[in-house]
Amino acid sequence: MEKFTTLRSTAVPLDIENIDTDQIIPARFLKATDKKGFGDNAFRDWRYNKQGEINNDFILNDPTYSGSILVAGDNFGCGSSREHAPWALVGYGFKVIVSSFFADIFKGNALNNGLLPVQVSSDFLKNLMSEITNNPETIVTVNLEAQTISANDGNLSQAFDIDPYKKTCMINGYDDIDFLLSKKDAIEAFEVEKQF
Amino acid sequence: MGKTLFDKVWDAHVVDKIENGPQVLYIDKHLIHEVTSPQAFNELRDRNIPILRPKQVVATADHNTPTENQHLPVKDELSRNQLEQLSKNCKENGITLYDLGHKYNGIVHVMAPELGITQPGMTMVCGDSHTSTHGAFGTIAFGIGTSQVAQVFASQCLLLQKPKSLRVNVNGKLKNGVYPKDVILYVISKLGTNSGTGYFCEYAGDVFENMSMEGRMTVCNMSIEMGARGGMIAPDEKTFEYIKGREFAPKGDEFDKKVAYWKTLPSDADATFDKEYFFDASDIDPMVTYGTNPGMGIKITEKIPEINDASFEKSLKYMNFQKGESLINKPINYVFIGSCTNSRIEDFRVAANYVKGKRKASNVTAWLVPGSKQVEAQIIKEGLKDIFDEAGFKLRQPGCSACLAMNDDKIPQGEYCVSTSNRNFEGRQGQGARTILASPLVAAATAVEGKIIDITKHLN
């Protein structure tokens, strides 16, 4: 997994609530057996119509906005557990998702793929959304070590929470398999005790 | 202080705890399918890590399978490749696979309970968010991502923060024509799609106590639609009776010993929950959804609420509905009865009971998709297939089908589908398709009438 410490980037405002993982990557693209190529189909049915033509009304198709930070409405990533959603977002080029609320499974899946979910207050989200919408060149800084997100030369700033264990994993690029394998003796002892 | 059902099962599976961090939770059963497992097998192969307990893994092919001509090679190349990968991965690793055509094949959340794989007090996971279904047995069961599938392969464990506890109580007597699907759609319409995020939900009260095991599965199945990782119902005599005698159920003395343990699992009377809600069964009517998330539900007799909010309006625009309008008399051309929510024998009995002696409306394309080969066999055995045939319906073969439209069972753009599945997200049943979630009764009535009717007027 790629290491994450600090990111400075412009951001894309996606002011829609309850974005489910079916929107992030529709089910018909889940037929691959590897993790590559999902970025091309991220938000496929919002980016293109059924005939494959570009939907110019969708924010990701607006050249005004770009960057590796996606700022999205409340309850991001609800629905299906498909890890293809973070694969698609990472493949598209996002490294951070900012929202006022994340669905559980999506949040875990994102963290397992080096994609940082930054949960902020509803007020902060509203202000950030309006700032980046009105001033697309605004640089947003996400500092994982300090657990802060700021924009507009620090005039807009907030601390965010992250599980300390997951923070260590993100900063060092560790994954859970390494950790779990280090617990093999405890796991086997547990199995004997519980008579599995 | 007393412990909850969830606490009892969770605490019995904690292998280790990280200070101020997640816990190492042991997983008893790991269910896998073709769509979310291949990358996990690859990960282990690439890192040269063996699967620790292949005997605790059970596989089925369901998400990406055709529901017609299952005896023929799968036409779509990508789908065929994914299914072949599953077979190959299972064979190489000594994992039992109920492949397409096997008498035990079916949707993972239908076939595992019917084989007695799902048992109270267990921890179960699957790379599918509707794994919450198995909570109907007093099981901690939840959906995981593919990285976590790989973690369970490698260690039979997961690293997790212990969720908070939530209890939803529904007491009283359900009205005639109100089914478990209506109960859970009602609860989600009241609580919203993220009220359960960070929580594990227990359903309690006489409505759930009186519900069949299949009904309990329908309810627990949709826990994820209010954001809860899982839902649970205390095991009772009905649970034990359901499990007894099934293929992988404990036998003889072992069964009695297990039952004695299972009886200790229900929440203690003095257990407390982080959040608790109470609802009255008499307030629940047959439900339908009108929007693009499962929380956007109304009683079938109600009108679409008038809410001024951009996301709400975007949703209505997608559905081509207006604020304040009723769904009754809306012409409907597609009906889907199936999915891990409502594809069990009781669901088809409800549908058959309604359509008996009637005819499917000529404008309606109806897909009746059993949840498993065993459900399919039972439908035939009970004569329900004959009823469906006579009414102009065609029974298809088992699979996830039009619930997520990975196979050819796609609803065309702009069309409405009254569906017994669990998600009405944009494009869920096909690009541009518009989904209305409902019970098997409402779905069957829609198929016969060719439009949504006020089913409450047709009940005694």
Image (tube, grey):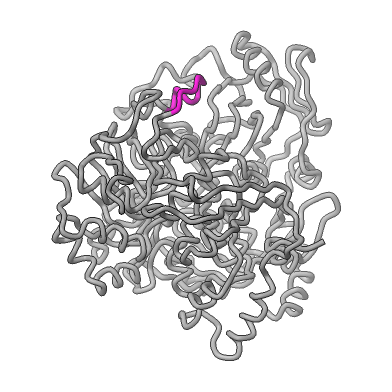
Residue B66 in view here: yes
Residue B371 in view here: no
**Residue B75 image point, x, y percent:** 26, 54
Task: Identify the residue at the far front of this view.
Answer: B460
* Quarter the C terminus of chain B occupies: bottom left
Position of B268 relative to B115 (above/below)? above
**Residue B207 image point, x, y percent:** 52, 58
**Residue B324 image point, x, y percent:** 39, 24
Q: Is B18 or B371 nearer to us in this picture?
A: B371
**Residue B102 image point, x, y percent:** 35, 72
Q: Is A126 or B291 nearer to us in this picture?
A: B291
At x 35% / y 55%, what residue is drawn?
A: B338
Position of B136 relative to A194 (above/below)? above
Numbered range of the magenta stretch? B305-315
At x 55% / y 69%, what residue is drawn?
A: B57
Q: Is residue B214 magenta?
A: no
Number of dots carrying numbers: 0
Task: Identify the residue at the far top of this view.
Answer: A134
Position of A180 relative to B288 (above/below)? below
Task: Identify the residue at the far right of this view.
Answer: B19
* Quarter the N terminus of chain B occupies: bottom right
At x 63% / y 47%, what residue is drawn?
A: B277
Q: Quadrant of residue B40?
A: bottom right
Q: Is A52 or B273 nearer to us in this picture?
A: B273
Q: Is residue B314 magenta?
A: yes
At x 46% / y 52%, what residue is drawn?
A: A33
Q: Quadrant of residue A5?
A: top right
In the rendered structure, the answer to whether residue A91 lies left or right of residue B34 reads: right
Q: Is A183 or B68 nearer to us in this picture?
A: B68
